Amino acid sequence: PGCLCLQFLSYLAACDRLLKQGYEEGQVEEAMEMFQYSEKKAAEFLHLLAQFNDMGFQQNEIKEVLLLCGNQREKALEELVMK
């Protein structure tokens, strides 16, 4: 049980750091779950999601493409442009 508690505290700390970067709570939680609680991968995903969103792409398409492309920016952008 102590181990789970530490994992949960680590998860909360990671979420807090991402929230402080200006990402929405729902998106942070979703990204953390999608990437098995890897803060690094979730942060990459959220950064690219925001970037592509600012370019005018649809959020659901961005999420799908980023997952398929493993957060590879150039590959994801290529896929989005072709849609």
Image (cartoon, rainbow, N blue to C red):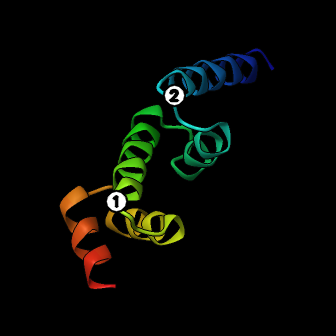
Answer above or below: position of 13 versus 34: above
Quarter where residue 6 is shown? top right
The residue that label 1 is drawn on is 70
The residue shown at (57%, 27%) is 19
Q: Is residue 37 left or right of residue 66?
A: right
Question: What crowding class fits label 1: few (fewer than 14 Cα within 10 Å), some (14-19), or many (20 or more)?
Answer: few
Name the secondary structure under disc 2: helix
In the image, residue 30 sits, relative to residue 14, either above or below, namely below
Q: Going 38% across and 64% down the picture, which residue do you hit? A: 56
Q: Where does the image place residue 82, in percent across and percent down from the top left? A: 26, 84
Q: Residue tagged by mark 2?
A: 18
Mark whose residue sits in front, 2 or 1 = 2
Residue type, mark 2 in image: Leu
Tell me which numbered mark, 2 or 1, is placed earlier along the sequence. 2
Residue shown at 51%/28% (left/top)?
Answer: 18
- Image quadrant in which you'd find residue 29: top right
Q: Is residue 72 left or right of residue 39?
A: left
Residue at (59%, 27%) from the top-left corner? Answer: 15
Please tell me whether residue 82 is drawn above or below residue 34 in the rendered image. below
Percent position (x, y) of residue 69? 32, 66
x, y (%) of residue 50? 41, 48
The N terminus appears in which quarter of the rendering?
Answer: top right
Amino acid residing under circle 1? Gly
Q: Could you tell me how many numbered marks the image carries?
A: 2
- Is disc 1 placed on a helix, strand or loop? loop
> On screen, 24 above or below 5?
below
Characterize the local packing of mark 2: few (<14), some (14-19) or many (20 or more) Cα atoms within 10 angstroms. many
Which of 1 and 80 lies nearest the eye of the viewer?
A: 80
On-image quarter of the C terminus:
bottom left
Cα distance between the residues tagged 2 and 1: 19 Å
